[in-house]
Image (cartoon, helix red, strand yellow):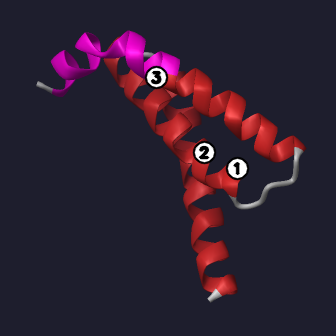
Amino acid sequence: MLEILLSRHERLLKNMALMLGIASTVAIVQNWYPLNLFLSLPFCVIWMAMGWLHGERQLKWINILFAGFYVYGIGRYVLVSA
């Protein structure tokens, strides 16, 4: 069922990922920390889903790794700034 949902909305999700990637890059260049973390995490989640949809194991595992880094960074930011 999830695969059907992903395949129906694949183009929209990929366009969203593109916009999130561009926004994240701008946030990095402009040093808008932690906005880059909050933009990069959904980018990785979308590409993880695309990796599962098309059976691209390497894409899936790379994005799982990076999503973990972003979750760690967001958690660290929340704990340090509190």
The x and y percentages for residue 28 are 82, 45
How many C-alpha atoms fall within 10 Å of the one at disc 3: few (<14), some, or many (≥20)? Answer: few
In which image quadrant can residue 44 be found? top right
Question: Would you say the magenta stretch is mainly helix, strand or loop?
Answer: helix
User: Which residue type does callout 1 highlight?
Assistant: Asn
Question: Nearer the N terminus, badge 3 or badge 1?
Answer: 1
Task: Answer whether residue 8 is magenta in the image.
Answer: yes
Q: Mark 2 near mark 3, Cβ–Cβ under 8 Å?
A: no
The x and y percentages for residue 65 are 58, 45
User: Which residue type does callout 2 highlight?
Assistant: Leu
Secondary structure category for the residue under label 1: helix
Secondary structure category for the residue under label 3: helix
Q: From mark 2 to mark 3, how far is it between C-alphas?
A: 23 Å
| Left or right of residue 47: residue 1 | left
Q: From mark 3 to mark 1, how far is it between C-alphas?
A: 26 Å
Q: Which mark is residue 66?
A: none
**Residue at position x 45%, y 31% in the image:** 46
The x and y percentages for residue 51 are 43, 22
Which residue is identified by label 2?
A: 39
Q: Mark 2 near mark 1, Cβ–Cβ under 8 Å?
A: yes
In which image quadrant can residue 80 be found? bottom right
Which residue is identified by label 3?
A: 57
Q: Quadrant of the C terminus?
A: bottom right
Secondary structure category for the residue under label 2: helix
How many C-alpha atoms fall within 10 Å of the one at disc 1: few (<14), some, or many (≥20)? Answer: many
The stretch of residues the image draws in magenta is 2-15
| Left or right of residue 44: residue 73 | right
Task: Answer whether residue 25 is magenta in the image.
Answer: no
